[in-house]
Amino acid sequence: GAGNYARVLATAGDQSITGLPSITIQGGTGGGSSGGTSNLGNFAFIRADSGAQSIDAGAISLAAGSSGVDSSATIQGPMQTINASSVTISGGGAGGSFSGARIGGHGGYVYGPTNLTLTTTGPITLTGGSTAGAAIGANPLGGTTTDVTINSGGDVTLTPGTGAGVRIGATSTTLSPGTISITSGGNVTLGQNGSVSSGIYSAGDVSLTANAPGGSIFEQGTSAIQASSCP
């Protein structure tokens, strides 16, 4: 079927999740055609339409659908403060303009800027899928201000899939203004899978810090950090 979704939505005012629950957001399979006037994907999301979004959780896991069209898994809001023990974001096998898994500003047909502070006691892991990627930051169309601050107590690892990459910040094709700051208690790794790469993208500044003893910031192959400055 198509247009079957699961959501936690605040249409007005602030949105708050407390109590340190584990959060799992899983896109479905199937779904409708992409590019029409409505999203008929079998998607799942947590979203604040207009107010601030605050989440205090245990482990957070987002996984896009394994097949279909626009079967995404997202956490969206105009201003986000997210605290968790760990964050895992996985792409999938769905096609369409709104597939994949992402934490950041509004996506879909009416998209908006990203203003995200993400703090974890453990690792942050992004893994691409066969056709749909994983991201922290801007909507897939890009072109909006993207401010992302990440403070991770563990590694920050970006691993592309067989057919879709992963990213933090803007998109590689539409660099947008903003500041990206990533501080890791372990290592920061941008991996590559064959010809598929990962990246951190901004038309503004990008700052990376690996605080582990002997910690490293590693770019494999054609993976990239693109910014106006990267101190």
Image: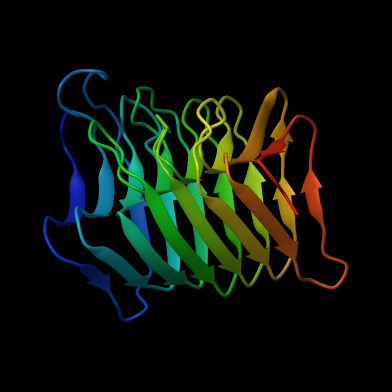
Residue 221: x and y in percent read 80, 32
Whether residue 230 is situated above or below residue 67 in the rendered picture: below
Q: From this viewpoint, is residue 26 visible?
A: no
Residue pictured at 20% horizontal, 51% vertical:
7
Residue 175: x and y in percent read 53, 33
Quadrant containing the C terminus in the rendered view:
bottom right
Image quarter of residue 73: top left
Image quarter of residue 200: top right
Asked if residue 95 lies left or right of residue 197, the reply is left
Asked if residue 142 lies left or right of residue 222, the reply is left
Residue lying farthest bottom?
19
Quadrant containing the N terminus in the rendered view:
top left
Towards the viewer: 151 or 121: 151
Colour convention of the picture: rainbow
Residue pictured at 64% horizontal, 37% vertical:
198
Whether residue 50 is situated above or below residue 33 in the rendered picture: below
Count of numbered labels shown in the rendering? 0
Residue pictured at 66% horizontal, 41% vertical:
228
Towards the viewer: 99 or 171: 171
Asked if residue 110 lies left or right of residue 67, the reply is left
Whether residue 112 is situated above or below residue 7 in the rendered picture: above
Residue 130: x and y in percent read 52, 27
Q: From this viewpoint, is residue 126 visible?
A: yes
Residue lying farthest right?
214
Residue 100: x and y in percent read 41, 36
